[in-house]
Image (spheres, rainbow, N blue to C red):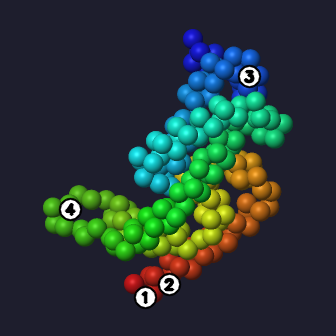
């Protein structure tokens, strides 16, 4: 019954109701769990993603009375918690990207002749991309991955990170420029 109610309500209506009835917060979890989990899993490994996603919803539940619908919707608010929790794991994330960069591409063996060309290219680019992501500042990496992995709009990224839309655009532009330069450099020297 709670899930049915949650599916029919807008975020603003859901917020008004879960403030009066905390049990309705499960509808927020049901609505946004997958988005948050996929974003976190895209940044960190799946085991940590489960923990951070759970912690995201725990924090959001504990702070549900602080949510201000005038400042945005629930989705970027939740992504903000997730991004902050990921920041606690940033050193591990950076080490993860550096390790991926050292691994290099998987060799293509004769037994995998049906492998799609795009999959091979993606495998070969993975270490270069991982190295480039590790070289970004945390702000640039957060903005880029919220758009690329979390599929948030610029406005939602701004809400999630507590920055202006212009700052989001600047960070994304710098991130793209750095990534292209690093990948081009790898392709020339690699």
Residue 158's x, y, as percent? 74, 52
> Mark number for residue 113?
4
Q: Residues within 10 Å of mark 1 (few under 14, many from 20)?
A: few
Camera-nearest label, 1 or 3:
3
The answer to whether residue 182 shows anywhere in this view is yes
Q: Which residue is mark 2?
A: 185
Which residue is drawn at the image coordinates 47% and 46% (left, top)? 49
Q: Is residue 159 left or right of residue 48?
A: right
Contact between marks 4 and 3 (CB within 8 A): the answer is: no
| Residue 14 in which image quadrant | top right
Contact between marks 1 and 3 (CB within 8 A): the answer is: no
Q: Identify the element where label 4 is drawn.
A: loop
Contact between marks 3 and 2 (CB within 8 A): the answer is: no
| Residue 177 in which image quadrant | bottom right
Question: What is the total number of numbered labels drawn onto the structure image?
Answer: 4
Q: Identify the element where label 1 is drawn.
A: helix
Q: Is residue 47 left or right of residue 181?
A: left
Which residue is drawn at the image coordinates 34% and 73% (left, top)? 104
The answer to whether residue 151 shows anywhere in this view is no
Which residue is drawn at the image coordinates 35% and 61% (left, top)? 119
Foreground of the two, 111 or 59: 59
Q: Earlier in the sequence, mark 3 or mark 2?
A: 3
Foreground of the two, 66 or 110: 66
Q: Residues within 10 Å of mark 3 (few under 14, many from 20)?
A: some
Measure how far apart labels 1 and 4 are at the Cα level: 28 Å
Q: Which residue is mark 1?
A: 189
The extreme left residue here reads: 111
Check the image and report above or below for 179 versus 79.
below
Q: Earlier in the sequence, mark 1 or mark 3?
A: 3
Camera-nearest label, 1 or 4:
1
Q: Identify the element where label 3 is drawn.
A: helix
Measure how far apart labels 3 and 2 are at the Cα level: 53 Å
């Amino acid at each position: 019954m709670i899930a049915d109610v949650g599916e029919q309500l807008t975020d603003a209506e859901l917020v008004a109701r879960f403030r009066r009835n905390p049990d309705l917060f499960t509808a927020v979890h049901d609505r946004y769990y997958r988005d948050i989990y996929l974003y976190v899993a895209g940044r960190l490994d799946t085991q940590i993603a489960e923990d951070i996603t759970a912690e995201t919803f725990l924090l959001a539940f504990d702070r549900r009375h602080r949510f201000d619908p005038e400042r945005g919707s629930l989705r970027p608010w939740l992504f903000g918690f997730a991004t902050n929790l990921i920041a606690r794991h940033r050193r591990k994330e950076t080490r993860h990207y550096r390790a991926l960069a050292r691994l290099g591409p998987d060799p293509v063996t004769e037994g995998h002749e049906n492998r799609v060309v795009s999959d091979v290219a993606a495998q070969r680019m993975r270490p270069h991309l991982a190295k480039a992501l590790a070289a970004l500042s945390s702000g640039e990496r957060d903005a880029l991955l919220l758009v690329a992995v979390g599929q948030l709009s610029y406005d939602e990224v701004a809400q999630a990170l507590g920055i202006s839309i212009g700052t989001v655009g600047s960070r994304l532009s710098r991130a793209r420029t750095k990534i292209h330069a690093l990948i081009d450099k790898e392709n020339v020297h690699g």
